[in-house]
Amino acid sequence: MTQPVSVEVRAGVARVVLCRPERGNAIDLATARGLLAAAIRCRQEGVRAVVLSGAGRSFCVGGDLREFSALSGDALAGHLRAVTDALHGALRGFAELDAPMVAAVQGAVAGAGVGLAAAADLTIAAADATFVLAYTGIGYSPDAGVTWSLPRLIGPRRALDLLLTNRRVDAREAAEIGLVSRVVEAGQLAAEVDRLAAGLAGGATAAFGATRRLVAAGLSAERGRHLDHEAEALAAAAVSAEGREGVAAFLAKRPARFHPE
């Protein structure tokens, strides 16, 4: 039986793939647990970049409503809690890595699929990608960090527009409002993401991690204290092996070798 999430680690890059193309990579309990296991593996193996993608025509259509509809009452509530516990654990796990995460999205990106795409540091969308929240359309409230990430990416006003009206957003608009980083032709998606991931994997991983944490904290931190955090992080980076190599390479006018093989 095919696993709902596959993970391959090569040259410092973890490729995490949602593998339920026949169901639009809908997130059921097994998929949520597969994502959590993937995040744990990425931490254990010290990867330097993560690529998240979905097999088939769509990235992820959201939660598996067929699975959910088979339950009711306390059984449904308990099942959804198990799904969100695993899914949210995966999101926390990926966020805690030093390694940046790149999402490659195509086709339908809905519900929790939007949450996964928004959780990435860089989201590259194929020109055929479309985004819709859909939660309130079925009487659900959001999960997958959507109410945390969307207001930070596109602002609370736009976030509420998408969450309350469930209108569909194409790839061009998604890039314009900041929901995705950039748009490429569908046939170029894999190559662009591979190029990006390889560059990140060769970069200063600890500095990437510090930068990710500073950006996340800075959205709610008091300015003076955040400036202190920046100063502390910079001092630590400067005396690290990465910092010493980066400066030496700059002065010698050569490429930095942060991860010599």
Image (cartoon, grey):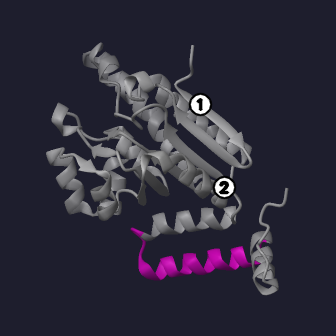
**Vertical order, 23 against 91 (above or below):** above
Question: Marks 1 and 2, how far apart in space?
Answer: 19 Å
Q: Is residue 192 magenta?
A: no
Q: Nearer the viewer, residue 227 or 103?
A: 103
State which quarter of the image contains the N terminus: top right
**Vertical order, 143 against 160 (above or below):** above
Q: Reading the chain from its start, which is encountered first: label 1 or label 2?
A: 1
Percent position (x, y) of residue 135?
23, 37
The magenta stretch is 219-240
| Residue sitting at the far right | 261
Mark 2, residue position? 198
Q: Amino acid at mark 1?
A: Ser
Mark 1, residue position? 6
Q: Determine whether the residue tagged by mark 1 lies in a helix, strand or loop.
A: strand
State which quarter of the image contains the C terminus: bottom right
| Drawn side of residue 194 relative to residue 57, left or right | right
Q: Determine whether the residue tagged by mark 2 lies in a helix, strand or loop.
A: helix
Q: Name which quarter of the figure residue 177 lies in.
A: bottom left
Q: Name which quarter of the figure residue 200 lies in.
A: bottom right
